[in-house]
Amino acid sequence: MMDNFEEYLRQGEPNKADKAQVWKTAIGLQQVDGLKPSDYLIETARQNIEGDITIEEVKQRIDSYYKQHPIKNDETRTEEADKVSARITEILSEKTFTFSPVEYLTIHRRLFQGIYSHAGKIRDYNITKHEWVLNGETVLYASAESLKATLEYDFQQEKKFRYSGLSQQEIVEHIAQFISYLWQIHIFGEGNTRTTAVFLIKYLRKLGFKEVNNDLFAEDSWYFRNALVRSNYEDLSKSIHKADKYLIRFLLNLLYQENHLLKNREMHVHYVPPVNDTVKTQNDTVNDTVFYLIKQNNKITATEISERLNISLSTAKRKIKGLKEKGIVERIGSDKTGYWKIIEQ
């Protein structure tokens, strides 16, 4: 999926390359919720990159396509992935931005209008989300009663902050803290991470980071989400502390083109570095993670698993084979159009 626009990036024709980069980012961000856009969206995006149709025409074609080809009980949420990808592309292509809670809410409304009934609205219920990186535990999110006040307070504090005199490391650490707090409020019931990512990209541009490496959002958006999770979770009874180092690594790569390795499995709360007799523990963690991804998305492919865990395709296939041989999962149908059935949890 990520290779669809590489030809435009290699050719270096400015207008086409810029459009291709934005599309690549928009599509990559769908991975935070395990979503994958359709081939129709990819082809329509190509026409936009070529200059044959405008982004408004892209959106109209996508809307028309799904009116003519309605998908019932779409577990893969392809329609959502297509529409939100086009809308992210539109927003990231605009040269407008206001640092305010209203802008944050507006981005969510524009991304999810017609998809979620609560698009652009502050949630009025409490939530939990079971995370594989936390071995099934949840981050403690802000309560529904305090959301508006908490959001406004965080924006006020950031507006007052002055970056002058800070080193690159200090700048990144502060941005990591701000975006981590903003995400943890989880002001939206769904679509929180994608909205936060789009807002962050726009805010970074406002701060002067014009040439950020948005390949990170295209290729490592799931790492970005897991890093936000780890920076907001602690369980001192198990000696698990908040860890912002993963988010800082991501931002250093994003803003200053550093080259920190970004491996999702290393963020798992039970991860142990592979040294001598700890290799088995690491393998168990990867096995658990592969199972969790299959449980989360029963149509996920070995290629998608390898991309999300930063492991080789052969390793992903070997882990899947092991789960099948143990009778934990079963493949129903073909590799291309079938799905996974959970036999034993």
Image (cartoon, grey):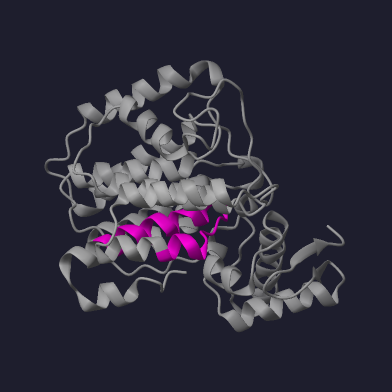
In this picture, residue 52 sits left or right of residue 310: left
The residue furthest bottom is 314
Query: Residue 160's x, y, as percent?
Result: 21, 26
Magenta-drawn stretch contains 33: yes
The residue furthest left is 165
Vertical arrangement, residue 216 with respect to residue 101, above or below: below
Query: What residue is shown at x 40% (from left), y 41% (from top)?
Result: 196
Read off the magenta span: 19-43
Query: Residue 328's x, y, as percent?
Result: 84, 66
Q: Is residue 203 among what the camera can see?
A: yes
Vertical arrangement, residue 72 with respect to residue 259, above or below: above
Q: Nearer the viewer, residue 40 or 223?
A: 40
In this picture, residue 272 sits left or right of residue 121: right
Question: Is the stretch drawn in magenta largely helix, strand or loop?
Answer: helix
In this picture, residue 68 sits left or right of residue 207: right
Magenta-drawn stretch contains 95: no
Query: Residue 197's x, y, as percent?
Result: 38, 46
Vertical arrangement, residue 41 with respect to residue 176, above or below: below
Q: Nearer the viewer, residue 270 or 326?
A: 326
Query: What residue is shown at x 74% (from left), y 68% (from top)?
Result: 338
Q: Quadrant of the C terminus?
A: bottom right
Number of labels in the image equals 0
Q: Quadrant of residue 332?
A: bottom right
Query: Residue 246's x, y, as percent?
Result: 43, 56
